[in-house]
Image (cartoon, rainbow, N blue to C red):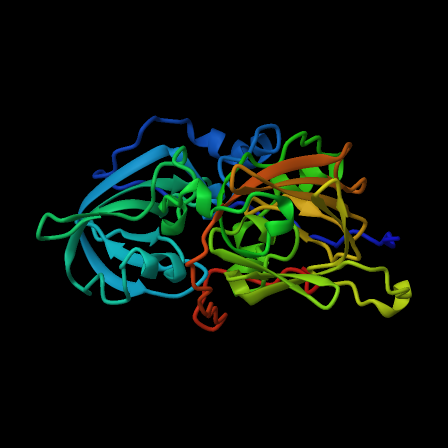
Amino acid sequence: MARWQSGYAAACKAADLGSIPGRASIVTRSFLMPKYLYYAIPIILFFTNLSAHHGPGLFDSQDTISLDNLKVLSWRYRNPHAELVVQDVNLKTWIIETESPNILRRMNILDDFFKVNSIITINGYFHRTDKERIKLESVILANNSQTIFRRGVSDGGNTPEDLVIIGSENKPVNSSAIFGTWVEGDGPDWQNLKPLGVTQQLLANFDRRDDPVKRCRTPGFPRIVDQPLGMQIIEKDEQIIFLYETFHAVRRIHMEDNNFIDNQIIPSRMGYSLGKWVDGKLEVKTNLLLPSLLTWDGHPMSSSAEVTEVYEVASGDLNLSIILSDSEYWEEPINRSISYTWAPNLHISDYDCDPALSRDWRIVNPVN
C-alpha cells in the first residue's frame, strides 16, 4: 500500500509586479488594453484555464506583435529557452524567447542560425506582464526566407516528432506495451481550479523570475509530465522507470511495496510513486513531494499533495489522466489529461542547462 504523508506548504514571498514598459511606435498589437488591466492579469488567470502548458503559459497568444528592421544584438542558444536580443530603429531593446535548443536542433535551427548585426523581421506575441519580452512564432531573414519557430496553439505539440505519421500497424495496441519512447502531443491544462484565499494571493503576486526552471532546476512532478521533449519508459527489476529528456529527469515507479518506512524516504521533487496494473491500465499514486509549482504561471503545490495517474494505450497513443488533491491550496481535487505520441525512432538527447548562462531569475525561497 502506498504511504501518504502530509507536510507544511512552502513559504512564498510576494513580489511586486513592477511597472509596464512603454511600447515603440513600430509595434503592431492585436488589440488595445487599458494599462490598469495589465496589473489585473495575474488575478484573472486562476479563474480561467491556462493558455498552454509549456513556455507560452507566460505569453498571451492573442496579444500579437510584428517588428521589422530589427538588428540582432545576441543569440543565446541555451536551455531552457534559446533567446534573441534585438534592437529596433528607435534603439529599444527587445527580448525574443524561442524554443529549447533540443527542439530547435530537430527543426534544423542551430546555434549559427542568427548572425549578430543582421537585420530581421519577427512575428510573435507578448509576455503577459513583461511587455518587452516576446514569444517568437516566425522570423524573416534579410534574404526574405521565412522560418516558423512555433506552430499555432491549436496544432498540438511543438516537437517535430509529433508530426511524424506512423501506421497503426506499427503502434502499441495495449497498455502493457507502454514501454518505449514517446513524445508529448497535447491536452487541456489543469481543470476544476478553485483556489483558496492563500492561493489567490500567491498567484496575484507571482513573479516569473521565481520559477525554479528559470535557474535550470527540474520542474519536478507532476509538472514534468507535459514537457515537450521525449520520454522513454523502461521496465527494470520490479520498477517502471520514466526517463524525461527535459532536465534529465528520472522517475521510478515501484511496482511492489517494499515496506519502506516513511521517515527513511527523502521527500523530493519527484516524490515516492507506487504503481499497479488495474484492468490493463497502469495506475500510479505519488506522495512525499516537495513544494513546487504546477505551471509556468505560478500555480502552487504543497508538500501535502497526493497525485493519482492512470496510463492507458488507445488507438496507438498513450493517454494519461491525473488527479491531484492538495487541500492547502485548492478547494477540490484538480485534474488534467495528456496524450503522448508514439516515437520509436526518437533519440533521447542530452539536455544541458547551466544556471550561470541563464538569466532573469532570483531565489526567493531555497525550498522552491
Relative to 33, is 367 on the left or the right? right
In the rendered image, the vertical position of residue 327 relative to residue 287, given as above or below: above
- Quick one: which residue is furthest to the front in this view? 169
In the rendered image, the vertical position of residue 185 relative to residue 244, given as above or below: above
From the viewer's side, name the closer residue of 289 and 18.
289
Relative to 87, is 30 on the left or the right? right
In the rendered image, the vertical position of residue 329 relative to residue 208, given as above or below: above
- The x and y percentages for residue 231 are 53, 57
Residue drawn at x 32%, y 35% is 64
Residue drawn at x 78%, y 63% is 267
- The x and y percentages for residue 135 are 36, 46
Residue 174 seen in the current view: yes
From the viewer's side, name the closer residue of 318 and 326.
318
Q: In which quarter of the image is the C terminus?
A: bottom right
Relative to 161, is 116 on the left or the right? left
Say how many tags the image has. 0
In the rendered image, the vertical position of residue 316 relative to residue 289, given as above or below: above
From the viewer's side, name the closer residue of 199 and 281.
281
Relative to 354, is 363 on the left or the right? right
- The x and y percentages for residue 211 are 57, 55
Residue 13 seen in the current view: no
- The x and y percentages for residue 317 are 52, 42
- Quick one: which residue is furthest to the left in this view? 143
Residue drawn at x 83%, y 67% is 265
Quadrant in the rendering for residue 324: top right
Residue drawn at x 47%, y 60% is 360
